[in-house]
Amino acid sequence: MGRVIARLRSSRTLAALSPQTAVLLGIAVLVRFVLVLAVVPDIQAAWFVPFLDNAVEHPSWDPWQSFLDRGGDPASFPYGPVMFAWFGVWAFLTSWLPAPWGTQIGVSLGLLVLELLLWALVSRWNRAASRLALLLIAFSPVAVYAGYVHGQLDMLPTVLIFASALLLRERRWSASGVLAGLAVAAKFSSVFVPPLVLIFLLRNVRFREHTRAYVLGLLPGLLLTVLPVLFPGYRTMVLETPTSQTAVSYALELGPGLSLVVLPVVYLALAGLLYRFKRGNPDIVVLVLGVMLTAVTLLTPASPGWYVWSIPFLAVLATPLGRQAVAAVWVFWALATVTLALRASPASWRGSDGPDGRFVEVGSFVNRTGTLGALLSTATILVGVLMLVLIYRRARPRLDMYRLSGSPMSVAIAGDSGTGKDTLCISLANVFGVSATSFLMGDDYHLYDRKAPLWKVTTHLHPAANDLPSMNRDALSLMQGQPVSAVHYDHTRGRFTKPRPIRQRELVVVNGLHALTSEEVRRTADLTVFTSMDERLRRQLKINRDVGQRGHALEGVVASIERRYPHAHRFIEPQADLASIVFRLEPVRPLPVEERVDDRPVEMTLVAYLRGSSFVEKLQRALISIANCPTWIEYLGTPGSVRVVVHPEHLRPADTAAVAQHLIERPEELFTGTPVWLDKSRGAMQLITVLALLERRKNGRVR
């Protein structure tokens, strides 16, 4: 006990608490400690203590059967080996004390230590809101009543489930699975939790690869749950306990012999809700878990201990949402405590005779209190439902900051050939992850391959040379989360391949000469980009690519450039006026007039025209102060339009990453693995594009 308190006092988060908060928490601990010393819950005296006393006095591989063989009540300890191990240790440590202390004081001290551990976990959850969350739990009437007056042991599975959720947020998949499995081995009712986490992992592309680690982590706890089935006493007291029937106790009568069991329906509905989040984050799982654990108490004749399970989840979800949410949670707990106190077993003062007659954990509150009982039960359920609706509606936008659960992010990039469209596409995939990015390439929608005679009289830049209706239809499908199938244009051979599937992923990049010609695509895409560059620079880079990389003849490439000019001016360049961002690359020094392959690096200046973006000042300050990258902003005549000039020649990948880390909130929600930030102009274009995309997602531009 002293070591736990010492660890809490040395915690950086708790050490940062104000003296007033520390005093309040101290008062809460003192109240609990007084209850530990003064009160003996009837349920502990009648059930838990006799079972643990028998386990201490008569050690056995099957303590459940050993207890039954000596005439014990089968309902005394309906818990698994983890619960038995934890409280068995505390019972052994205090078994030398005389009655009425002995085993019971050990059980209560074990509960107090668990709650202090829970406080430490809550303080680690959200350091900015930890003070209010700690106070909300510390002065939760249902936590005090359920643990120290009624005497339930559910604080152990609560701590394990909450710690598992915390590790899930920290992407520690195996450890999260281990604790979730141990929770099941402590109390079998915890089995509700792992399926929800597995749905989340399997449904989200970013996290699917971690499903195996989570499942492997579950195995030790599941084995601890299953192996004791070989013991008859375990089967009788744990698996055949009447408590297991409470999940199907509340049902709606639909007709003669036909009823609808409420809790399983609600659980499946919540699982279906989580399944819809194709691009969720672990905080969404926490929200669904909080709703589910609270729904269990509302939709079943739950014992007081079941209310403990949702306490930390409601606290960490409600505290960032404001006073209304916090007040709703506390009022719900207060009503639940009054209702439970009138229908559940009481406690006795230490040294008194304890419960008389046959012990009953939860009585028929409504039958014993008439109208008052009905009103209190109804009020508790009504306030609980309203509280959950309030928390869900307010928490979901906060937890899903970039609205990834609604639809994939999408960028449409247009521009003339050789202006850096493909380079920008690849750089975005480097940031968000190749496995999380879907590409729709405009070249795949050319109507003819390279040897078609039609190219003698037209170019790819003419809309009629492309299947734009199909491209736009497929682009909209991907942006709406639907997979498509398209052929691929192989630039090396100048031929089309067989159709290939393009799966919906978290980022959709539409890249093509005519990517912005469709009004519906522009309206649906989160961000529209147009790439351009100085014409002499474009010619040089296109020659380097088509001649040096793709193996085309220099004369043919130059002739193609010249032949494309009329169509570029007519069909491609007007799209710049339709884009949210226009990038233009310009050489710092004039380039040679001679046209040939020249792979020597060219020092460039990046000019970006942006509309309706509010992050540019922050970006300018970060580029100058963090990356030492000269940046200027010119405010144009059109409201909300700016011209940003960046000299990125000395911008290194580490500098780009440092600027991104400074400016991007909650990057763990966005990127698959470690993002790869680039250097020079590519890095600057990455930053501007990603920041503009995220700003639009946060501001609610979602389909």
Image: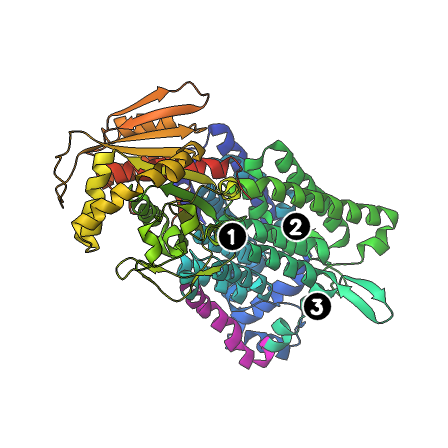
Neighbours of disc 2 within 10 Å: few (<14), some (14-19), many (20+):
many
In terms of secondary structure, what is the magenta stretch mainly? helix
Tell me where residue 9 sits by quadrant: top left
Q: Secondary structure at mark 2?
A: helix
Q: Nearer the viewer, mark 1 or mark 2?
A: 1
Q: Position of residue 27 (x, y in %)?
A: 55, 36
Residue 27 visible here: no
Residue at numbered disc 3 = 245
Q: Is residue 217 magenta?
A: yes
Tell me where residue 656 sits by quadrant: top left
Of pointers 2 and 3, the one earlier in the residue sequence? 2
Residue 116 visible here: yes
- Seen in the picture, residue 224 relative to 628 is either above or below; the reply is below
Neighbours of disc 3 within 10 Å: few (<14), some (14-19), many (20+):
few
Q: Position of residue 681 (x, y in %)?
A: 25, 37
Q: Secondary structure at mark 1?
A: helix
Most distant residue in the top direction: 637
Circles 3 and 1: CB atoms closer than 8 Å: no
Span colored in magenta? 213-234
Q: Residue at x 87, y 48 (%)?
A: 371
Q: Position of residue 245 (x, y in %)?
A: 70, 68
- In the image, 476: left or right of 627? right
Neighbours of disc 1 within 10 Å: few (<14), some (14-19), many (20+):
some
The CA distance from mark 3 to mark 1 is 52 Å
Q: Residue at x 74, y 48 (%)?
A: 381
Q: Nearer the viewer, mark 3 or mark 1?
A: 1
Q: Is residue 588 magenta?
A: no
Q: Which mark is residue 149?
A: 2
Residue at numbered disc 1 = 473
